[in-house]
Amino acid sequence: MRGFPEYFTIWHIAGHYALRGIAYLVLAFLIVPILVIIPLSLNAEPFFTFTKGMLALDPDAYSLRWYQAILTDQKWTLAIWNSFVIGIAAAILATVLGTIAAVGLASPWMPFKRVITALLLSPMIVPLIIIAAGMFFFYTTFGLVGTYPGLIIAHAALGVPFVIITVTATLTGFDQTLFSAGLSLGASPVKAFWDIVIPLIRPGVISGGLFAFVTSFDEVVLVLFLAGPEQRTIPRQMFSGLREQINPTILAVATLLVILSVALLVTLEFLRRRSERLRGSM
Amino acid sequence: MSTTVNVAARRGFLNAAVAFKKTGGARLNKHSGTDVFLEFDDVKKSYDQKSLVVKGFNIAVEQGEFITLLGPSGSGKTTVLMMLAGFESVTSGTIAIRGQSINKTAPYKRNIGMVFQNYALFPHMTVAENLGYPLGVRGMAKADQRKRISEYLDLVELGDFGNRYPGQLSGGQRQRVALARAMIFEPTLILMDEPLGALDKKLREQMQYEITRLHEQLGFTVMYVTHDQAEALSMSNRIAVFNDGIVQQCAAPAELYEKPANAFVAEFIGENNFIEGQVDRIEGKHAIVTIKGEGTITAEAAEGLVAGGRCVVSVRPEKLFIHPSTHAHDHDIKATFVARIYVGDFIRYYFRLADNKEIVVKVLNDLSAPEFGEGDVGRLQWLTSDCIAFPHSGEMPGVTG
Ligand SMILES: Nc1ncnc2c1ncn2[C@@H]1O[C@H](COP(=O)(O)OP(=O)(O)OP(=O)(O)O)[C@@H](O)[C@H]1O
Ligand SMILES: [Mg+2]
C-alpha cells in the first residue's frame, strides 16, 4: 500500500477513496451492460434473464443455440451479408473521397478552406433524422431509395468526416519537402503521391476507413428510411427482432458485434503506435 | 584522427586551387555563348505581384563549375534555387540549360538533383530504397539498380548502411545519404540549399570536404546556397554575393576578398575597416582622398566614385601594420590606442582616429606584437594597393566583425 503524505487528514483520505469509488462506479455503468449480454447470449432458455441453472454454473444451462439460430435463419444471414457489403463499400468510398478531400484541404492554396471543411464535416453534426429525411426525398428522384447504391452512398457521406479528420491529423505532421524531393528525383506528382505521401499518411487513412466502416455498421436511422427489405442490415434486423421474436438471438448478434468492435479498436491502437514509431524515428 | 588531418590538408590545397582559378573568373562573368551550361537571363521574381524579391538575376555558369549564392537572410537565395528546381514560377526572364529555356519544364522533368536543408529522406524507405527511388522512377532494371546503389553507398562511405532506415542514422550520415540520392541518377546539375546548416562545426567541415571531393571526382555542376562565408570561400569556384534581390558581385573567392566591387561586399566578406573621407581628385585608377585630420591618402578607386563626393576607404585589419614594422607602406596615420584583445593566434588592437571612429588591427601573435598603454598614440601604416575608396552611401558601417 502506497503511503499518503503525512499532512493528510482523515478527510483527505476519505476523499481519495470516494473519488476512486465513483470512478469505478462510472466504469461499471459503462461496461456492465455490454459485458452482461455475453453470458446471457449463451442462455439455453429463450429468456433475457439469468436462469437458476446459469447462476449455479450448470453446463446444461448454457448453449450456443442462438448463435446457431443466427446462422440458419435466412433473415439474419442476409442482414449480416448486407451489413458487411454496405459497410465495406461505404468505407472504401468514404476513404477514397475523404483522403482526397483532406489532401486538398491541406494545400496552402486551397480557397474557402473553412467553409468547405464545415460543409464536409456537417454529417457529423446535423441530426441523423434530418439527414435521413432529406436523403429520402432527394434519393427518390433518382430512384436510389431501396437500392444498394443508395444506401452505400448515404453511408459513405456519414463516413467521410471521420476520414477527413484522421487524415488531416496525419497530414499536419507531413513534411511537404518530402513530396518536392520526390518530384526532384523524377517522380510525376501522381507517382510521388502514391509512393511517398500515401505510405506516410496510411495510418490515418486506415483508421479513418475503420471509423467509416463502424459508422455504417451500426447505423439504423438512414437504413430505416432508405433500405428496402432486401437491404436490411444487422441493426435494422435487431430492431425488428426486438418487436417480433424476443429471444436471445439478438444478444448473440450483439456479442458478435462487441467482439468485432474490440478487434477494430485493437487494430486502431496498433496503427496509432506504428505511426508514432515511424514519425518518432525522423 | 586521420580524417581531420586530411580535411585540413585538402582545404589548404583547395584554397590554392581556387586562387589559381581566379584569373578565369572575369571571363566567366560574360555571356560567352558556346560553353555556357546554365544561364539566368534577367530573372525576376515576385510572390505578391507587388514587390520584387529577385530583381534581375543574371549569371552564366559553365559545365562543372561550383557556384555559391551567398547573402544575408531573406535576400532571395532560396527563391533563386526554387525557380531553378521548378518549385517556384519565374515572374519574368528566362532560365536556360544548354541554351534551352526550362521555364515551362515541369520539376520532375528537369533532371536536376537537389539536396534539401532538412535532408528530406523518405522515412518509410531504407537507405538503399531511398537511393533506388530515382533509378526505379527512370525504369532501371533491379540488378543494375543494386549495383549503382552499392557503388554510391561506397562513394559516400556508407557501404554497410543500406538496410538502415533514415531514423537510425546520425545527422552527418543522413546528409551523406541525401547527397548520394541527389547524385545517383547522374544529373548534370545539383542544387544544395544550406545542406550543412544543421550540422555542428566539425561535421560541417568534414562534409564540406566530402562535397568538394565528389564535385571534383564526378564533375557535375553545383549551385550552392549558404550564409556561411567561410564555407563559400573555401568551396566555390565563384560566389555570387546577394543582397536585396540583386547580385552585388559575382567573382572568384580571392577576387571577392581582395577586390570587392562595392562597400556592401567589402563589409559582408571578411572583416573590414571603413575610414570616411572626401574625394579630392581621381587620377586614373587611384583616388586622392582627404581624411579628417590626416591630409590626403591615395586609394584604389572603386566604380561610381566622383571627385568632390564623400567616400569611405576600406582597409582590412590584417593589412594594417603598427609602427614600427618592417613591412613596406605608403600611408602612415596617427591613431589613439583604445584596447588590445588577445585572441590566441593573433591579437586585435583597437585604435581611435581623429574623427573618433574606431579601427581594428590584427597582428600575428609573435615577438613583434607591441605593447600600448591607454591613450598612447601609435601610427598605423598600409599600402595603397590594400585600400579601396567606395562612394559613400548614407549610413556607413564603422568597424565590422
Ligand atoms: N512563398 C513565399 N511567399 C511570399 N514571400 C516569400 C515566400 N518565400 C519567400 N518569400 C520572401 O522572399 C524573400 C526572399 O526569401 P528567400 O527564402 O529566397 O531568402 P533566403 O535568401 O533564402 O534567406 P535565408 O538565408 O534566410 O534562407 C523573403 O523576404 C521572404 O519573406
Ligand atoms: Mg533560404
Image (spheres, coloured by chain):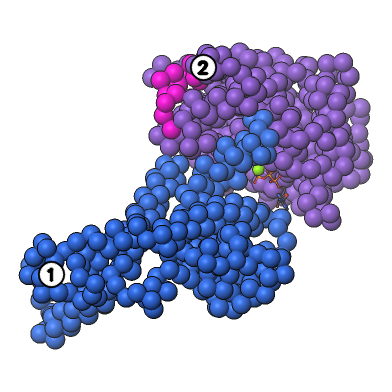
Q: Which part of the image, by quadrant, shows the N terminus of chain B?
A: top left
Q: Mark 2 sits on what residue?
A: B146
Residue occupying image coordinates x 59% and y 51%: A96
Q: Is residue B147 magenta?
A: no
Q: Residue furthest bottom?
A: A11
Q: Tell me where residue A33 appears, x and y as whole percent.
A: 27, 74
- Magenta-tinted stretch: B152-165
Indicate the colour of chain A: blue
Q: Nearer the viewer, mark 1 or mark 2?
A: 1
Provide the secondary structure element on which disc 2 rests.
helix
Please say whether residue A113 is visible from this viewpoint.
Answer: yes
- Residue A236: name its quadrant: bottom left
Q: The numbered mark 1 sits on a residue in which chain?
A: A
- Residue B211: name its quadrant: top right
In the image, residue B370 sits, relative to residue A112, either above or below, namely: above
Q: Tell me where residue B312 appears, x and y as whole percent.
A: 78, 42
| Foreground pick, A15 / A105 | A105
Q: Is residue B162 magenta?
A: yes
Q: Mark 1 sits on what residue?
A: A54
Callouts 1 and 2 in the same chain: no
Please say whether residue A106 is visible from this viewpoint.
Answer: no
Q: Is ligand 2 less than 8 Å from the beta carbon at label 2?
A: no
